[in-house]
Amino acid sequence: MGRRGYPPEFRRGVLDLRETGRKVADVARDLEISDQTIYAWRRQERIDKDLERGLTSSERAELTVAKKRIAELETELAI
């Protein structure tokens, strides 16, 4: 399942399990998800908490909407 396929509640639960001291590999194996997925979610959480540099979740969402709108406008312009 793709990154956007997991509900926020599931992601939060996975990160909560990780915070209890469980290893990423163990959580990933038990839940049958990629360990890289967990690392990406953990990194995004750190960015959202301003502990690491990068685009916050809200900034990412805004950028996605803007890119979609630009694509629509470019299509209209081409017509």
Image (cartoon, rainbow, N blue to C red):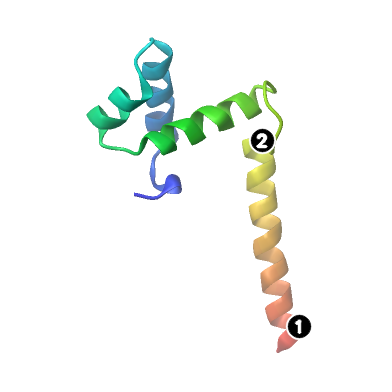
Local secondary structure at mark 1: helix
Q: Quadrant of the C terminus?
A: bottom right
Q: Residue at x 28, y 23 (%)?
A: 26
Indicate the position of residue 76 as horizontal and vertical percent values: 71, 81
Of callouts 2 and 1, which one flags the residue occurring earlier in the amino acid sequence? 2
Crowding at dot 2, Cα within 10 Å, few <14 / some 14-19 / many 20+, comes out as some
The answer to whether marks 2 and 1 mark residues whose Cβ atoms lie closer than 8 Å is no
Local secondary structure at mark 2: loop
Indicate the position of residue 56 as horizontal and vertical percent values: 66, 35
The circle drawn on residue 22 is none
Mark nearest the camera among 2 and 1 is 2
Instruction: Name the residue carrying label 2.
Output: 56
Between 26 and 10, which is closer to the camera in this rendering?
26
Q: Residue at x 25, y 31 (%)?
A: 29
Indicate the position of residue 62 as horizontal and vertical percent values: 69, 48
Q: Residue at x 65, y 45 (%)?
A: 60
The circle drawn on residue 77 is 1
Kindly indicate the quadrant of the structure image that contains residue 24: top left
Q: Residue at x 43, y 25 (%)?
A: 12
Kindly indicate the quadrant of the structure image that contains residue 70: bottom right
Calculate the distance from the C-alpha at mark 2 to the C-alpha at mark 1. Answer: 31 Å
Total count of labels: 2
